[in-house]
Structure formats: C-alpha cells, structure tokens
Image: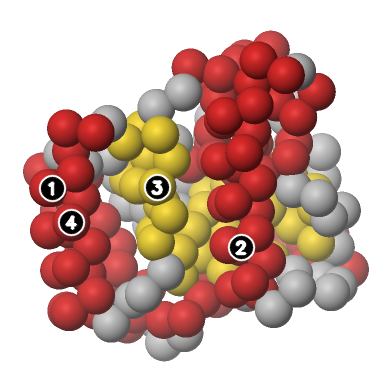
C-alpha cells in the first residue's frame, strides 16, 4: 500500500526512537524511507528537519514527500507544532519506552496527548524496548494499565540485543548474518505486527 506514514515518538528522550526508526528503515520489507524531525539525525535519506522554522522553510518539500512516499518519521523527544503535525499525518504511531518509573510516567503523558489529538487508538503501537526477563511483572502491570485506562491493545516487546545498536552504529543488516538469527526473527515479528496494523 502506498504513502504509509509511521511516526516513532515519545515525550521521553533516550528510549530508542532513533534506534527503532533505523531498525525498521533497514529491515522493513517494503520501500520505506527515513525522515527525521529530530536534532539527533543519523541517516535520513529523505529529509532532516531541525525545528519548526526549518519546517516552514521546507514546507512545500515536506508536503510533497508526505504525499508520495512510504515514510518512517523519527520525531524528537519534545512537543511542538511540527511533531504534532507528523503525528496527525501518520497511519501508525510507535511509542517506545523502557520499563522504569520515569519512562512509564512520561509515556502515560504522551499517550494522553496523542488521544487528545483524536488519534485512532488502533493506530498506536507501544513497543517495550530493551526488555529483560526480570521485568515481566512490571511489563504485565504496565500493559494491563494501558489496556484498561486508554483502551490501547497493540503492544510489542523488543529484547535487549546488542546487535540492534550495531545496526545504528555500523549499518549492519541483521538479515544477512546467521549469528543474528534470533534478533532478526524478532524484528521480522515486529515488521509483521506493523503490517497487520497498517492493513498491508
């Protein structure tokens, strides 16, 4: 399906927004390109936008890109009119977080914000990042709370694999090496989850 937009966002910085954006960009089976609306640009192949003034300068170019391309949009760990614009234009919003109290609180605030912007709950995917087995109880409590209080049902768990950071640091493709089989399989499941939500 053409012109699908996936935005990766959360109010909390350092939760893996850029990492997950780039993992998907490198491994998503469809022709998705990466656009970054963040100061921490990595390898944006379409456009890098630093702030709202930059957005106004590039407005026509951005609108053209949004109308023609499948995009993964890496948003910043902050809120402004630019980020809101991208969330509203997206077919899917991925919300990554770590399972500590500060991350969880900021994620609740972000979810409330997204829902106040009348984003479809079915188009939200919460990704629990760098999950460890000893966090299972916290994960269960968090998922149950979000389901009961925000009526969000799409969740995915990414285990803590060092190979994911290699994708960002060294431009590694996990599907090309046998010894990355387990993290690659997990990434395939994430891709399939995303495709199901998008109806692809």
Q: Position of residue 143 (x, y in %)?
A: 23, 62
x 86%, y 72%: residue: 2
Measured Cα–Cα span from mark 4 to mark 1: 5 Å
Quadrant including the N terminus: bottom right
Q: Which residue is mark 3?
A: 157
Measured Cα–Cα span from mark 4 to mark 3: 11 Å
Q: Which residue is mark 4?
A: 140
State yes or no: discs 1 and 2 in contact (Cβ < 8 Å).
no
Q: Quadrant of residue 41?
A: top right
x 74%, y 40%: residue: 27
Disc marking residue 138 = 1
x 47%, y 81%: residue: 122
State yes or no: discs 2 and 3 in contact (Cβ < 8 Å).
no
Q: Position of residue 9 (x, y in %)?
A: 45, 53
- Counting residues from the start of the chain, the first of labels 1 and 2 encountered is 1
State yes or no: discs 4 and 2 in contact (Cβ < 8 Å).
no
Q: Position of residue 105 (x, y in %)?
A: 15, 53
175 in relation to 56, above or below? above
Query: Relative to 85, is 160 on the left or the right?
Result: left
Q: Is residue 78 visible?
A: no
Disc marking residue 194 = 2
x 40%, y 47%: residue: 157
Measured Cα–Cα span from mark 1 to mark 2: 24 Å
Measured Cα–Cα span from mark 4 to mark 2: 21 Å
């Amino acid at each position: 399906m053409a012109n699908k937009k996936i935005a990766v966002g959360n109010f909390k910085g350092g939760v893996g927004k850029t990492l997950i954006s780039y993992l998907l960009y490198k491994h998503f089976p469809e022709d998705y390109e990466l656009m970054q609306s963040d100061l921490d640009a990595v390898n944006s192949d379409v456009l890098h936008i630093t702030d709202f003034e930059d957005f106004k300068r590039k407005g026509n170019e951005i609108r053209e890109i949004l109308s023609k391309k499948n995009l993964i949009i890496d948003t910043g760990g902050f809120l402004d009119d630019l980020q809101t614009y991208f969330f509203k234009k997206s077919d899917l919003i991925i919300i990554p977080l770590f399972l500590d109290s500060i991350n969880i609180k900021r994620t609740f605030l972000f979810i409330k914000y997204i829902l106040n912007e009348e984003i479809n709950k079915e188009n939200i995917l919460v990704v629990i990042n760098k999950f460890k087995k000893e966090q299972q109880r916290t994960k269960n409590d968090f998922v149950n709370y979000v389901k009961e209080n925000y009526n969000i049902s799409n969740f995915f768990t990414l285990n803590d694999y060092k190979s994911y950071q290699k994708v960002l640091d060294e431009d590694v493709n996990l599907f090309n090496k046998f010894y990355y089989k387990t993290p690659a399989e997990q990434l395939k499941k994430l891709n399939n989850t995303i495709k199901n939500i998008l109806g692809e």
